[in-house]
C-alpha cells in the first residue's frame, strides 16, 4: 500500500442545485380582489340591487384564482417539470370548477340574485387577472 496524500481529494466537487426564486404571483390575487372591491363600490352606487350578487361573484373569483395560484406554484422550480405543468393544468380546471359550482349553488340557493351581474363580474375579474398577470408577476 502506498501512502497517497491526495486519496481523500476528489477531482469533481458535488454541485448543489440552486434554488429557483419564486415569482410573487399573489400580486395578481391582490389586484383581482382590489378590482372586485372597486366593482362592488360602483355596483353599489349605480345598481344597488346587485350588491349581493357582485359581492358573491367577487368572492368566488378570488377563491378560484387563489386556488389556481396555490396549485400552479406548488411545484415551481422542481426538477421534474411535468409536476409544474400538471399542477398548473389542475389549478386551471379547479379554478373554473370552483367558480362554476359556486355560481350554480348560489343560483339554486338564492334565485333572487342577479345572474347577469354575477357572470359579468366573474368575466371581468378573470379577464383582468389574465391580462395583468404578465406585468405583475416578475
Image (spheres, grey):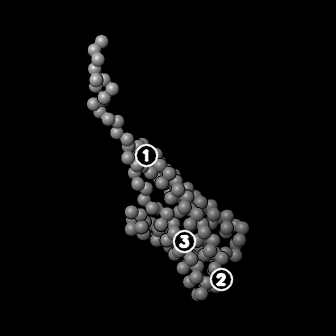
Percent from the top left, x then y, of residue 43? Answer: 58, 82
Q: Residue at x 54, y 71 (%)?
A: 33
Q: Which residue occupies 30% across, 29% down?
A: 10
Horizontal and vertical percent for residue 98? 59, 60
In the depicted structure, whether residue 88 falls above or below residue 125: above
- Between the residue at mark 2 and the residue at mark 3, the CA separation in whole angstroms equals 21 Å
Q: Is residue 36 left or right of residue 18?
A: right
- Reading the image, the residue beneath label 1 is 78
Spot occupied by residue 105 in the image (x, y as percentages of width and height): 67, 64
4 or 79, nearer to the observer: 4
Viewed as shown, does residue 84 lie left or right of 10?
A: right
Residue 16, quarter of the rendered image: top left
Secondary structure beneath label 3 = helix
Circle 2 residues within 10 Å: few <14, some 14–19, many ≥20: some
Residue located at (38% from left, 43% from top): 17
Q: Quadrant of the N terminus?
A: top left
Q: Mark 2 or mark 3, which has the lower sequence index?
A: 3
User: In the current view of this chain or complex, which residue is farthest to the top?
Assistant: 1
Q: Which mark is residue 45?
A: none
Q: Decide: few, some or many residues near mark 3? Use Cα within 10 Å; few <14, some 14-19, many ≥20.
A: many
Q: Residue furthest right?
A: 109
- The residue at the point 62 percent across, 74 percent down is 55
Does 74 sit above or below residue 2? below
Label 3 sits on residue: 33
Along the line of sight, the residue nearer the viewer: 45 or 28: 28
Indicate which disc residue 49 carries. Answer: 2
Distance in Å between CA atoms under marks 2 and 1: 48 Å
- Seen in the picture, residue 109 relative to 78 is either above or below; the reply is below
The image quadrant of residue 130 is bottom left
Amino acid at each position: 500500500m502506498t501512502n497517497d496524500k491526495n486519496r481523500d481529494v476528489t477531482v469533481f466537487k458535488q454541485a448543489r442545485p440552486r434554488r429557483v426564486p419564486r415569482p410573487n404571483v399573489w400580486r395578481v390575487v391582490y389586484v383581482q380582489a382590489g378590482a372586485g372591491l372597486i366593482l362592488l363600490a360602483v355596483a353599489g352606487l349605480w345598481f344597488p340591487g346587485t350588491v349581493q350578487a357582485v359581492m358573491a361573484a367577487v368572492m368566488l373569483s378570488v377563491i378560484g384564482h387563489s386556488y389556481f395560484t396555490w396549485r400552479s406554484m406548488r411545484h415551481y422550480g422542481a426538477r421534474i417539470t411535468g409536476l409544474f405543468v400538471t399542477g398548473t393544468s389542475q389549478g386551471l380546471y379547479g379554478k373554473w370548477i370552483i367558480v362554476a359550482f359556486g355560481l350554480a349553488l348560489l343560483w339554486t340557493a338564492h334565485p333572487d340574485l342577479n345572474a347577469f351581474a354575477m357572470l359579468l363580474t366573474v368575466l371581468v375579474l378573470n379577464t383582468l387577472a389574465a391580462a395583468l398577470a404578465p406585468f405583475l408577476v416578475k
